[in-house]
Image (tube, rainbow, N blue to C red):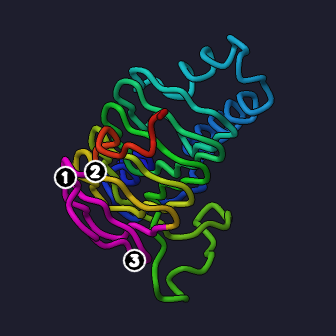
Amino acid sequence: MTEQEKMLKGMIYDPNDGELATLRKYAHKLCSRYNRLDEDDGKRSEIIEMLLPQHNDVYLQGPIFFDYGEFTSFGKRCYANFNFTVLDCAPVTIGDDVFFGPNVCIATAVHPLIAVERNMYETEHGMLTDREYAKPIVIQSGCWIASNVVVCGGVTIGQGSVIGAGSVVTRDIPEGVFAAGNPCRVIRKITEQDSVYLKKELWSK
């Protein structure tokens, strides 16, 4: 089994494996190129095609930071604001019509809690590396992930839910709710009473 196969299966793997290091460098180079371009530069879409082969329709404001890119999939009409970071060491699955505020971090990577297990060690080839594993993340269609949210590995966020600014999502969130906090928890269900069409003060007099 290759180190990439171990990584994607959620097993302990060597992040300094040559194949994985090459994939990361390629993704990082594409992100760097994307971030240097003006937002109306057509070359941005060419880079997205190379970085995110599993996307349907996504607009990334930039700057963006992906570990691999190819292990992240987007549905239709998705948008991410400034400083969108995705550590996709495990699959990241994003549905349709998902919006991300500034400084959102999606982090599938997990490190051991016990210090000696987390420390660097030398491989049989004399290279320093560490022990890592990763857990997949699923963000279902219609979600809004507000500013400065961290979504941790192993989490599924249910359809149509909203995650409040500054939250750290460490466990699954059901569909159709507003959730917030650190750790993130459900505050209440989203209902028809939340419609902007009922808030007259939001519309011209």
Residue identifier under label 3: 183
Q: Secondary structure at mark 3?
A: loop
Amino acid at pointer 1: Thr
What segment carries the magenta color? 167-194
Camera-nearest label, 1 or 3: 1
Of residues 2 and 15, the one nearer the viewer is: 15
Of residues 86 and 41, the one nearer the viewer is: 41
**Alpha carbon distance from label 1 to label 2:** 6 Å
Image-based side of 63 in relation to 23, left or right: right
**Alpha carbon distance from label 1 to label 3:** 23 Å
User: Is residue 127 positioned above or below 121 on the image?
Assistant: above
Residue identifier under label 1: 191
Camera-nearest label, 2 or 3: 2
CB within 8 Å, label 1 to label 2: yes
Hey, which quadrant is residue 22 in on the image?
top right
Q: Position of residue 160 (x, y in %)?
A: 26, 45
Q: Position of residue 183 (x, y in %)?
A: 39, 77
Q: Residues within 10 Å of mark 1 (few under 14, many from 20)?
A: few
Amino acid at pointer 2: Asp
- Identify the disc placed on residue 68: none
Of residues 188 and 44, the one nearer the viewer is: 188
Is residue 169 located in the magenta-colored stretch of the structure? yes
Amino acid at pointer 3: Pro
Q: Secondary structure at mark 2?
A: helix
Image-based side of 118 in relation to 125, left or right: left
Q: Residues within 10 Å of mark 2 (few under 14, many from 20)?
A: few
Of residues 135 and 130, the one nearer the viewer is: 135
Q: Residue at 32% x, 31% y: name it.
A: 96
User: Is residue 177 positioned above or below 54 on the image?
Assistant: below
Residue identifier under label 2: 194
Is residue 175 located in the magenta-colored stretch of the structure? yes
Q: Secondary structure at mark 1?
A: loop
